[in-house]
Image (spheres, grey):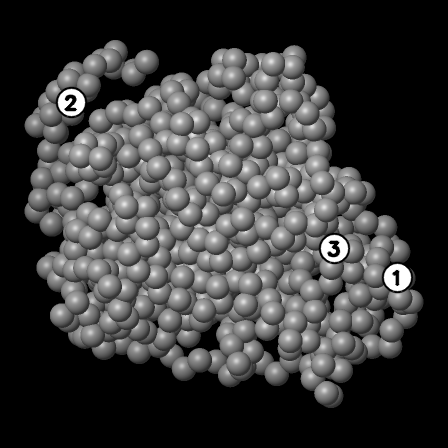
Amino acid sequence: MPDNGLNDRTSRTTLFAIIALAACTPGKDGQSRSADTTGDRIIHADKEPGNWLSTGRNYQETRFSPLDQINQANVSELGLVWSYDLDTNRGQEATPLVVDGIIYTTSAWSKVQAFDGVSGKLLWQYDPQVPGASAVKACCDVVNRGVAYWNGKLFVGTLDGRLIALDARSGKPVWSVVTVDQSRNYTITGAPRVVKGRVIIGNGGAEYGVRGYVSAYDVDSGKMDWRFYTVPGDPTKPDGAASDDILARLAKKSWSPDSWRLTGGGGGGTVWDSMSYDPELDLLYIGVGNGSYWPQKFRSPSAPVGGNNDNLFVASIVALRPETGEYVWHYQATPGDQWDYTSAQHMILTDLKIGGKRRKVLLQAPKNGFFYVIDRETGKLISAKPFAKLNWANGVDLKTGRPNFNPDSDYSKTGKVWLGEPGPLGAHGWAPMSYSPRTGLVYIPTQDNAFPYVIDATFKPLPKGYNLGVNTSAGPVPINPMGIEAIRKTIRGYLTAWDPVAQKAAWRVPQGMGANAGVVSTAGDLVFQGSMAGDFIAYNAKTGAKLWSFDAQSGIVAAPVSWSKDGRQYITVLVGWGSAQGLAVGPLNWSKQGPRRNISRVLTFALNGKAKLPPVPAATVRKLQTPQQFADAATIDRGRHYYQRSCYACHGPSAISGGVLPDLRYSDSIGNPDVWNAITIDGALASSGMVSFKEAYSAEQLNAIRGYVIAQAHETVRDKGQ
């Protein structure tokens, strides 16, 4: 129940009005401000078009700016105003906040920065000192997607599972709480949200076997108000959480009775990114991630008597009461998910006229490739259509809301290799989409990709690294030019403008290989988006025509924001690639000249901006290491299996790095067993993120990996004709 005891919508609205009248004070720009609640400002975000107060700009997460000073007629005059080079060149995924001309953003390793938005001057930086060893728990780089702001405080989730409140003026810590069991493989990479004085934060780690949940903390004290677990735990030990009742009544019936034991207390379902909030309905929507382990055979081999095997609430949207965590409704997009088809992607709330009736809807384009229009009051599915290539289902039954599964996709049962579309990169990953009320279109970073799903018959979870349950070494990825070109063709990026009423694409712009960046749309009828190739681009929101571009010198994956100060509109974006695809799918990030290096920075643009970026640093000349091979063919093949099991996500498939983290074919360590052992066994580089793997592999197995990398280095030399 609400703390103030007011249960009806009218009373809550009246209370807001009283507070606003009693406690308004002039802000820095002379406008009246509600002195006690940032929430009221976020609810009425369109009254402050110059600010960007929450990660999606408003609670509905539309990522649409009402500013139109920069428009189709003059966007060609857009120029750089300032740039600031960050001190960490890993993946940069943050959406900046802008509060009265001050930019607050985060960078890799959960660092927080405050900038004067007009001059670009760094006001302060806070480093939470995340231990380097935490990197091994992060599936998809040491990224952070931003902060939340509330009444003079900032809130950031750290990679090692802390939630920290900072004074927005000074950057000094106010309080800090540990939100996870740090002995397990939990991380936090998502941006918190603040609703009704509660900081809402989830976590990641489903690829490592953890159990997902979302928690709410008091903004002033850091005291936890409630927690909601997304999958059942030990049936003999209730959690004492807001989720206890619904898990017992509903979710438990959708898991094998022994799932808790099989998953070691995990099961997945992490709430690692997307949330949105409807102030009128007073509903908080959370997007839930994939099941763990991927194949149902390893986490839920059979349905209980009288139940099903849907594994609630994995790959679902769940509606909760933000003050209590009380369950209201759910919609599961991918029942029993076995393909890493998370529903943790961006959710947008808006009202659409459908079938002659105005509907309150929630829009989502999750990994599985279907675009969903859902009644956000009831959770009932209104429509679902493919927005990208997919073959795991041939449609969604609108009566039941369930997909029509392709029987071949159940690789857990068949034991066969199944080439699934999309693969685990998803038809739409974490990169935020945007909805423009002017065009009625949703702008989706889209990609077509495939993956050979096959169960790992010998799977046993390891204490370090990925625990997927699929055989990632089912076939070696070729490193010759023809092989690389074949891989390139399987992953193609697009910017898709989607009509959510007609459920079809209005236009689609091909963007080459690899993942796409987040987007923002504006009242100037523009869509801004970066690219992995390093271009920052403005598109015509109605047609998709390219109107302007800027060479940022390094790949972009983060979403831009638009804001204003003293009558001038600005566009700000973080530059720096990495993340899951940037690290793991190495060849896809290469241009004809090789991989562009990561230069992480903050860029801000405005009309008639005259600033210039510094020259691109000269490329470092690297030399392949080709020491004499010590391993026989059988050892090399075992090394390939171990490498693909635990190393490829950071150092690239087939030992071909994406360019952010070291390419082991060029490392001196592969020719020196003592150095190799110091790194892989003794953890000599743990502070940099490369921890010891002696808990997962024997010395002989780690040496076999070295033999495999040497073999790949020699193969590269032969391929290049050297």
Rendering coords of residue 278 (x, y %): 27, 31
Viewer-side label of 1, 3: 3
Closer to the chain start, of discs 1 and 2, is 2
Element under label 3?
A: loop
Rendering coords of residue 563 (x, y %): 21, 55
Viewer-side label of 2, 3: 3
Q: Which residue is mark 1?
A: 635
Element under label 2?
A: helix
Label 2 Cα crowd, 10 Å radius (few <14 / some 14-19 / many 20+): few
Decide: is 570 above or below 62. Answer: below
Q: CA distance from mark 2 to mark 3?
A: 58 Å
**Which disc number belongs to residue 13?**
2
Decide: is 255 above or below 432. Answer: above
Q: CA distance from mark 1 to mark 3?
A: 16 Å
Label 1 Cα crowd, 10 Å radius (few <14 / some 14-19 / many 20+): some
610 relative position to 92: left or right: left
127 relative position to 20: left or right: right
Which quadrant holds the C terminus?
bottom right
Q: Quadrant of residue 35?
A: top left
**Which disc number belongs to residue 474?**
3
> Looking at the image, which residue is at 67% across and 58% down?
648
Q: Residue furthest bottom?
A: 722
Which three-letter amino acid code belongs to the residue tagged 3? Ala
Decide: is 270 above or below 425. Answer: above
Front-most of residues 487 and 593: 487
Element under label 1?
A: helix
> Looking at the image, which residue is at 44% across and 37% down?
396
Q: Is residue 349 visible?
A: yes
**Which disc number belongs to residue 310?**
none
Closer to the chain start, of discs 2 and 3, is 2
